[in-house]
Amino acid sequence: MTILDKIIARKRVEVAQAKAAVPLSDLERQPLFDRTCHVLRTSILDTAKTGIIAEYKRASPSKGIINDRATVNDVVSGYQQAGASAVSVLTDADFFRGSLDDLKAARAALQLPLLRKEFIIDTYQITEAKAYGADIVLLIAAVLSPEQVRTLSEFAKSLRLNVLLEVHDRDELERSMVDSVDAIGVNNRNLKDFSVSIAHSLELVSLIPDRFIKVSESGISDPATITSLREAGFQGFLIGENFMRTEDPAQAIQEFVETLAG
């Protein structure tokens, strides 16, 4: 089994346990469930912002602990102040040491679109995302059939959530594009072996229709890379480890943005 296979197997158990512990009706009664979501497209295309989707991530299967000291509030507040267009928060517990409480804490600190970064396989997780303050959910084409992408994205839209579809290659892109998706992200990290190459984004950008916001994900550590990706047609740039692996992620993004602007 690959790490991805192990994550999905564990996720099936987690979702079953969550459904047994917290009924949908309880989620739908949460104070945040009825809030109006921020619009990802509006924020990404706002010229006063950077296009960066900055991520809060404590750990990963490939790197182990990345940063378990910086608090959610301090980090995401710093991201917002530096001009991020959106914020991503990992909620997987076993492999990334995240939680839904992290998502809720980020929501309390932000006036930006908030992405629940999770391995979504069930509509229950989308309801959870809405109940804990997310504006955006991630659907990963590598672990979902085209029918599942359609069903899950349409359900998310019924809750007025934004949908980011993540693909890694041309086959995943072509089989998974549906109108109920708002943005398409090209993951430069291979989820099977965790190797990283920006070439994945550059190869696929021209194949993504302009009706979708185009996002390049992972492996972005140099402001010059964003300049190249922007020239190629990308509007959004998901950056996680580059900021989180520093002692002060808020300062790291500020310095990154200053270099990008300069």
Image (tube, grey):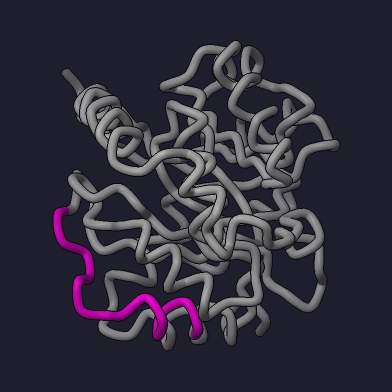
Whether 252 is among the magenta residues is: no
Identify which residue, 210 or 98, lies in the foreground: 98
State the residue at coordinates (69%, 35%).
205
Residue 58: where, in percent of width, then height?
Answer: 26, 63
Looking at the picture, does residue 92 appear above or below residue 246? Answer: above
Left or right of 39 on screen, residue 30: left
- Please identify the quadrant where the C terminus is shown: bottom right
Q: Quadrant of residue 213?
A: top right
Q: Quadrant of residue 51?
A: bottom right
State the residue at coordinates (65%, 30%).
155
Left or right of 167 on screen, residue 191: left
- Please identify the quadrant where the N terminus is shown: top left
Magenta stretch?
64-77
Residue 260: where, in percent of width, then height?
Answer: 61, 76
Left or right of 213 on screen, residue 225: left
Looking at the picture, does residue 210 appear above or below residue 255? Answer: above
Q: Residue furthest right?
A: 211
Residue 157: where, in percent of width, then height?
Answer: 72, 37
State the residue at coordinates (46%, 27%).
122
